[in-house]
Amino acid sequence: MPETFSQTLQNWQTFYFLVGGAAAGLVGLTFVAITVGSGALNVQNVAALRTFVNPSLIHFIYVLITATVVVMPTITGMQLGILLVLAGLVSAGRALTSVPFIWQRYKDHVVDMHDWAWYFAVPFVSYLIYILNPARNAEIRHRLLGCRACQSRAASTGDHETALPG
């Protein structure tokens, strides 16, 4: 007999508690590191701080928030899917805002392709996964977009399990 969504999440509850606790500790340590290093900051370093430190801090916060949401006893698959899509959209937009700074630093030979990969490409792909994985569900697409086209597409492709009724 297949498990319900809440039962599946309950089986993973300890994992999410551990991951969430580790993320909370790393968020705290990041704030300590920024505070200790704040004496070395000047106007020229602020853009670099936003481009290279913010993603790490934001990733830790996303792990913490995701772990917190998943261990909520009343979360449904729909709510989790919508939260993941919205988090992915906001994150992808934030990642795109760092492109001009990284591009300028790349032209000045300050950063190389490794920086592009680890500070833009890999996070951006993970944000796309946040967006696309839950968005495969027709009901989530319908709730987010409010369109019947999503339902009719699901019905025309034979995706009857996720198509909305009537």
Image: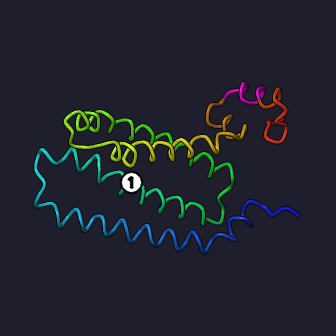
Seen from this angle, which residue lies furthest right?
1
Judge left or right: residue 62 versus residue 146.
Answer: left
* Image position of 63 with respect to 81: above or below: below
Q: Position of residue 59 (x, y in %)?
A: 42, 55
Q: For the residue carrying disc 1, how many other residues have a C-alpha within 10 Å: few (<14), some (14-19), or many (20+)? A: few
Q: Is residue 159 magenta?
A: no
Marker count (numbered): 1
Q: Which residues are magenta?
A: 147-153
Which residue is under mark 1? 58
Q: Using the rendered view, name the quadrant where residue 98 is placed.
A: top left
Q: Is residue 98 left or right of residue 134?
A: left
Q: Main secondary structure of the magenta part?
A: helix
Q: Amino acid under label 1? A: Ile
Q: Residue at x 28, y 38 (%)?
A: 102
Q: Which one is in front, 44 or 11?
A: 44
- The local secondary structure at tag 1 comes to helix
Q: Quadrant of the N terminus?
A: bottom right
Q: Position of residue 53 (x, y in %)?
A: 29, 54
Query: Is residue 151 inside the magenta stretch?
Result: yes
Residue drawn at x 68%, y 55% as measured from the top left: 76
Q: Compare residues 91 and 119 and report the one nearer the observer.
A: 119
Rendered residue at 56%/46% (across/down) = 130
Q: Position of residue 144 (x, y in %)?
A: 61, 36
Looking at the image, which is closer to me, 163 or 112? 112
138 relative to 15 in the view: left or right: right
Tell me the quarter of the image containing the C terminus: top right
